[in-house]
Amino acid sequence: MVHADSGVPPKWVRWLWEVDATEGAAEQDEGAGLGVGKIVRAGVALADAEGLDGVTVRKLAQCLGVSTMAAYRHISSRDEVVAAMVDVAFGPPPALSGPAEDWESGLRCWATAIHIRYDAHPWLLDVPVQGMPTGPHRLRWMEAVLRVLAGAGLDLQEQLNAALLVDGHVRTVASLKRSLAAATHEGRSEASVGWLLTRLKADGLTSMAQVLTVGALDDEQGYELDYGLDRIIAGIRAGIGTARA
């Protein structure tokens, strides 16, 4: 049930929709004085360089060459900046297939596109998911996948459940890959690997000893996006068959 709300949305929400609807607004915003747009885009650049923890209103103000108080005249909090950053970083969704019989490829395309966004902006994985988004880009991503899943014959609740399942899988894979890349970059002592392997064998953890020996979780080999997608899609397909039986 949707409740009427006569209140005016925050400035950053209005900015997201106005920029999205106005051709060339991004370029115009860059040439204007300090505003929500400059602060949010500076936030995306800062998060790409330093991670989400590196984004503070004080640091954004420094990057833009203004005082912290000047920044606060356009945004109310760091949380507002981050929420707007997410919508800007995701950008518009990909064009998905329309025919109902091609819902599987549409779902794969959607999942792959989200994975690419996480790869381009890893800090997106650190932003808490707090209810339905309000920005135009994220809402269009949701609209796109719901339409694809509607083509599979799912009702609205099933569409939402399936979309959350796929998104959760993609986030998990992207997060694990990021963690693995960080561990690889930091390096791992061969001596500690040898010690752990000895302990695993001594404790009878033969499967994990084999995983460590062959490096099954190294170089991103153990975290395959398609493996989970195949099984999610198979489950959806099986559910459709059961419902129609």
Image (spheres, helix red, strand yellow):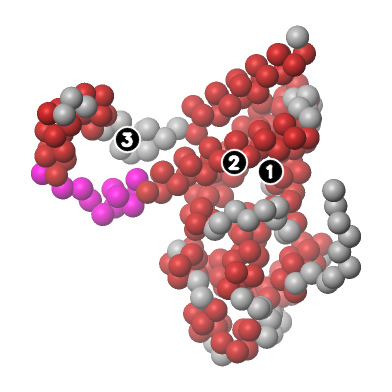
Query: Going by the image, does 49 lie left or right of 25?
Result: left
Q: Residues within 10 Å of mark 3 (few under 14, many from 20)?
A: some
Q: Earlier in the sequence, mark 1 or mark 3?
A: 1
Near mark 1 (Cα within 10 A), the count class, few <14, some 14-19 or many ≥20, is some
The range drawn in magenta is 180-191
Q: Provide residue 170's location: percent of width, then percent of height.
A: 53, 40
- Which amino acid, by three-letter code, is at mark 2? Asp
| Disc with the residue nearer the chain's start (1 vs 2) | 1
How far apart, in angstroms, are the residues tagged by discs 1 and 2?
A: 15 Å
Q: CA distance from mark 1 to mark 3?
A: 30 Å
Please name the residue shown 65% across and 16% down the image: 238
Where is 189 relative to 26, above or below? above
Q: Is residue 219 left or right of residue 192?
A: right
According to the picture, the residue beneath numbered tag 3 turns out to be 217
The reply to whether residue 63 is in sight is: no
Q: Is residue 186 magenta?
A: yes
| Disc 1: which residue | 94
Residue most toward the top?
A: 245
Q: Nearer the viewer, residue 163 or 218?
A: 163
Which mark is nearer the camera, 1 or 2?
2
| Mark 3: amino acid | Leu
Q: Secondary structure at mark 2?
A: helix
Q: Position of residue 39 (x, y in %)?
A: 62, 76
Q: Dot 2 corresponds to which residue?
A: 167
Q: Is residue 153 left or right of residue 198?
A: right
**Observer able to see residue 115:** yes
Write the residue at 32% across / 35% down.
217
Question: Circle 2: is it few (<14), some (14-19), or many (20+) Cα within 10 Å?
Answer: some
Which mark, residue 59? Answer: none
| Residue at 41% over, 44% down | 177
| Element at label 3 | loop
